[in-house]
Amino acid sequence: MPTAEMFTKILQEHRAGTGAYDALNIIPSWMADLARADALEPLDDYVDRHGYREELDEIAPVYRDNQMKVGDTIYGFPDDGDVFIMYYRTDILGDPELQAAFEDKFGYAMPVPPRDWKSFYDVSCFITERTGSETYGAAFFRDPPYAQFMFQERFRVEGGRFFDADTMKATINSDIGVDAFTDMREENKCMPPGVETWGFVENLAAFLAGDTAMTISWPPYGRWAAGYGLDQEAFAWVPKSTIAGKVGYATPPGDAPELAAGFSLGISASSRNKEAAYLFIQWLNSKEISLERVQLPYALRDPFRASHFTSEEYKSRWAEAPQYLEALEAGATSGLLDLSLLQTDKYEEALRQGISRLWAGEDPKAILDDVAAQWDAVTERIGVDKQKEAYTEWASRPNAYPNN
């Protein structure tokens, strides 16, 4: 079913007591809500009974320490190393003539790839101008459900905090937030027309066709840009890559990429087959089977164990695979958690609506003031003390904010 419907469906089936689901895929930011609703089965007893704790310790720390537990209780096994990675054309950004012209214009050496948002803007717009829009300097998925993840990352990289930790008043409308909104809209001017509506597929198609020189997305882009597995029938919907062998990998500007959704494996508390369901997710998550799964070109499951990043088998899959895995491992060290509160979806929806207004040309400050007011109203409805407890727990995690 569509990802956007999964949270509601899991909760509905639990409340109805249908036992419709046994094993579950859970986006980690949902885990606190689902656990507090008693919709998820605690897993610690199963883990100890089946001697699995040692193997769980081998999961990369950013996923192991942040996407398994609510409080001290295990409710899920990390199953997907989602993290935003920057992809860039090495033949374009590495062109000596382009680099010399860039330095002549801006007075500093062109960074390959850009490591901050100011130089990203300079490089992107310079390439677009230089090629006469034959190849745009960059493009992103800007459709609000995707763009809100990019804003969450950028806001924190620049030093923003979502709430005042004492009062739980939203601070998303700070100068940092307004600057991020303003800059995001300005960057669109150097991107392909209509980029504001682009989702995962539109952005992917443009990059694989060679129409854009830089983009940011989840790990599958990196495999598919290399042409890995695209001859399989399951990939009939993916455009053929014209840029294989010409793609570099790095963390996005600021080196603190959004983990952006991801999945954990859990068990429905209303399942009538809990033991079997547990053993199934343990098998899926295991060191041996998970390595097979993350190498499947079409699986939409990305490396999340330390052994995935160092696998010689995976490194042999295409010429640049070692650099790809190195970038993913860097993201798995410094990656930022999605905001996770009680009723997180209400906060995200307000932000999505705000981004739609941003693309429509409204004032960034006025938009974020409205979003902050909506966040405060949701917090009041839930209860300030209850939400403060949830936020304090989330904000104390190692990867909630950069250098936490």
Image (tube, rainbow, N blue to C red):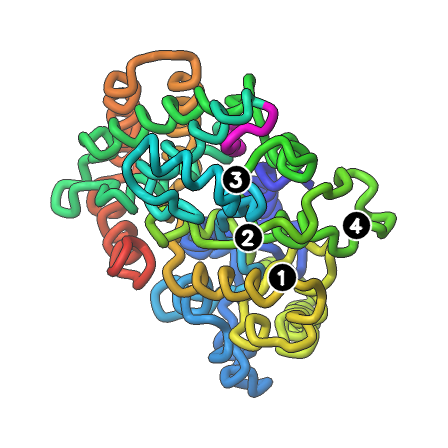
Under mark 2, the amino acid is Gly
Quadrant in which the N terminus is drawn: top right
Under mark 4, the amino acid is Leu
The answer to whether residue 100 is magenta is no
Instruction: Name the residue that disc number 3 marks.
Output: 215
Residue sitting at x 55%, y 63%: 323
Q: Position of residue 32 (x, y in %)?
A: 41, 54
Q: Give the main secondary structure of the magenta stretch.
A: loop
For the residues labelled 1 and 2, the Cα–Cα distance comes to 8 Å
Under mark 1, the amino acid is Glu
Please tell me which residue lies in front, 132 or 309.
132
Mark 4 element type: loop
Q: Earlier in the sequence, mark 1 or mark 4?
A: 4
Q: Where is residue 42 in the image (x, y as percent from the top left)?
A: 49, 68
Residue range highlighted in magenta: 134-143
Regarding residue 401, the answer to whether it shows in the image is: yes
Q: In this view, does 388 lie to the left or right of 220?
A: left
Instruction: Name the residue that disc number 4 marks.
Output: 230
Instruction: Name the residue that disc number 1 marks.
Output: 320
The answer to whether residue 142 is magenta is yes
For the residues labelled 2 and 4, the Cα–Cα distance comes to 19 Å
For the residues labelled 4 and 3, the Cα–Cα distance comes to 20 Å
For the residues labelled 3 and 1, the Cα–Cα distance comes to 17 Å
- Category of crowding for the residue at label 4, using alpha-carbon neighbours closer than 10 angstroms: few (below 14), some (14–19), many (at least 20): many
